[in-house]
Image: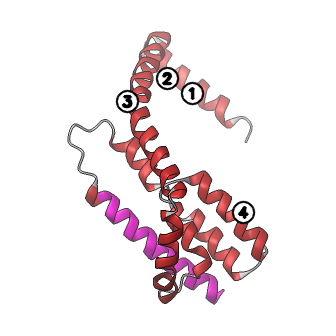
């Protein structure tokens, strides 16, 4: 396994030499494009990080958790996971910290911890990923993809909790 990365590099360099590609020039051009892309993504990421912080600091996350806990319970999602399900689309590190808290509180083999781990692992930081993927598009039509991902995340969370309950 330790040789996979070096072998990939050797294969790419060999292929480039066979095709007579100027490796250093192409590498430099790629770095230049990567820097431009990174600079174009930074404002979007800064906005998302600020929204996450404001969401938590304003107390809105606590109010929303309190409001949605009965709805989530109706669909089979334990109320203890409501905040995790709400935080995950915004922040991977924030939801990881919350997952650690759930595991410490309920123990690693409990139903709630298993549900939390599966929900954490099967969902994505939707707003961060959408900022990265859609930043280069001239027309940003983000509503439909984000709604689809959020609905599918909710449905997979319901399914994950059902599977954890059965197993």
Marks 4/1: CA–CA distance: 41 Å
Q: At numbered mark 1, what does the secondary structure look like: helix, strand or loop?
A: helix
Q: Residue at 77% across / 73% down in the picture?
A: 105
Mark 4 or mark 1: whose residue is earlier in sequence: 1
Q: Nearer the viewer, mark 4 or mark 1?
A: 4
* Dots 1, 2 in contact, CB < 8 A: yes
- Residue tagged by mark 4? 100
Q: Residue at 68% across / 75% down in the picture?
A: 114
Q: Nearer the viewer, residue 129 or 83?
A: 83
Query: In x, y percent, where is residue 80?
Result: 62, 77
Q: At numbered mark 4, what does the secondary structure look like: helix, strand or loop?
A: helix
Mark 2 or mark 3: whose residue is earlier in sequence: 2
- Residue tagged by mark 1? 11
- Other residues around mark 4 within 10 Å, as few (<14) / some (14–19) / many (≥20): some
Residue 48 drawn above or below residue 114: above
Marks 4/3: CA–CA distance: 33 Å
Q: Residue at 59% across / 74% down in the picture?
A: 81
Marks 2/3: CA–CA distance: 32 Å
Q: Nearer the viewer, mark 4 or mark 2?
A: 4
- Residue tagged by mark 2? 15
Q: At numbered mark 3, what does the secondary structure look like: helix, strand or loop?
A: helix
Q: Please, what is the dominant secondary structure of the magenta stretch?
A: helix
For residue 83, what is the image quadrant? bottom right
Mark 4 or mark 2: whose residue is earlier in sequence: 2
Q: Which residues are magenta?
A: 145-167
């Amino acid at each position: 396994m330790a040789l996979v990365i070096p072998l990939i590099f050797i294969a790419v360099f060999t292929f480039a030499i066979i095709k007579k590609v100027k490796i250093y020039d192409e590498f430099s051009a790629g770095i230049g494009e990567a820097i431009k892309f990174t600079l174009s993504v930074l404002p979007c990421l800064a906005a998302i990080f600020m929204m996450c912080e404001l969401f938590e600091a304003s107390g809105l996350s606590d109010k929303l958790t309190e409001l949605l806990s009965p709805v989530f319970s109706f669909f089979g999602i334990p109320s203890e996971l409501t905040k995790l399900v709400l935080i995950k689309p915004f922040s991977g590190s924030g939801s990881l910290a919350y997952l650690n808290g759930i595991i410490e509180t309920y123990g690693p083999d409990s139903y709630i911890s298993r549900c939390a781990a599966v929900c954490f692992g099967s969902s994505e930081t939707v707003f961060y990923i959408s900022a990265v993927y859609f930043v280069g598009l001239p027309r940003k039509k983000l509503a439909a993809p984000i709604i689809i991902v959020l609905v599918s995340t909710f449905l997979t969370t319901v399914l994950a909790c059902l599977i954890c309950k059965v197993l």
